[in-house]
Amino acid sequence: GQNIDQPTEMTATEGAIVQINCTYQTSGFNGLFWYQQHAGEAPTFLSYNVLDGLEEKGRFSSFLSRSKGYSYLLLKELQMKDSASYLCAVRDGDYKLSFGAGTTVTVRA
Amino acid sequence: GAVVSQHPSRVICKSGTSVKIECRSLDFQATTMFWYRQFPKQSLMLMATSNEGSKATYEQGVEKDKFLINHASLTLSTLTVTSAHPEDSSFYICSLKGAGDTEAFFGQGTRLTVV
């Protein structure tokens, strides 16, 4: 099975940077995903890491260290619309996704 | 990229009735689809893996006789919540593996309310 931990809540100011950490313990690893989810909506894909290192996509970057079972999602130049829940998910060899509980990010003006 | 269509987006039903939720892959043939459930302020929990042409694989604690899954074609999987009760009220989401193996595509989700 999978054990995935991420902080429950984070608050940051518009224009700032926020880093959401995710640690995991898995029985099989086939990639780590970050999703954004607004209340009442389905998750939307943000990033995917399967090898160690940093993946950058515009204002969002994601980092993975497989040896440490650790990932983070970095959100830069925060905008009000970035207020949402961010889900860390680990995929196993059967392509099943196990999700963390999600981190609610609140962006304040 | 793949597009997943899930229907209905919202449904309210009476306790004891059954509700069917459809998940369609619009862009490619999906031999495997996944069904998740999300309770308020909680994360997504995998319920079952839907396999085209064979029986679904259910996660521990999920009643297969209550949550019937049918994956009769490569583009359609259905989840039927049978004899629904108020505690089944939840957000149900389907997903399928992207063709490029780099992401999972999610349906829009179905908000089920059992009264």
Image: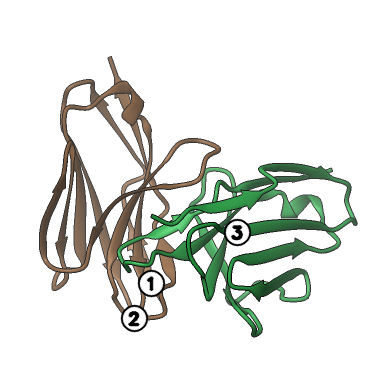
The image shows residue B24 at horizontal and vertical percentages of 60, 59
Q: Residue at x 72, y 76 (%)?
A: B64
Labels 1 and 2 positioned on one and the same chain: yes
Quadrant placement of the N terminus of chain A: bottom left
| Crowd tier of the residue under label 2, counting other residues whose Cα lies within 10 Å: few below 14, some 14–19, many 20 or above | few
- In the image, farthest residue toward the top: A109
Residue at mark 1: A2
Labels 3 and 2 positioned on one and the same chain: no
Q: Residue at x 50, y 56 (%)?
A: B44
Labels 1 and 3 positioned on one and the same chain: no
| Crowd tier of the residue under label 1, counting other residues whose Cα lies within 10 Å: few below 14, some 14–19, many 20 or above | some
**Chain containing mark 1:** A
Residue at mark 2: A27
- In the image, farthest residue toward the bottom: B54
In the depicted structure, whether residue A24 falls above or below residue A88: below
Look at label 1 and name its amino acid.
Gln
Residue B91 visible in this rendered orientation of the protein: no
Mark 1 and mark 2 lie on one chain; the one further toward the N terminus is 1
For the residue pair A86 and B102, the one nearer the viewer reads as B102
Q: Is residue B100 left or right of residue B32?
A: left
For the residue pair B1 and A82, the one nearer the viewer reads as B1
Secondary structure beneath dot 3 equals strand
Q: Any mark on residue B22, and which? A: none
Q: Are marks 1 and 2 in contact (CB under 8 Å)?
A: yes
In the depicted structure, whether residue B41 falls above or below residue A69: above
Q: Colour of chain B?
A: green
**Chain containing mark 2:** A
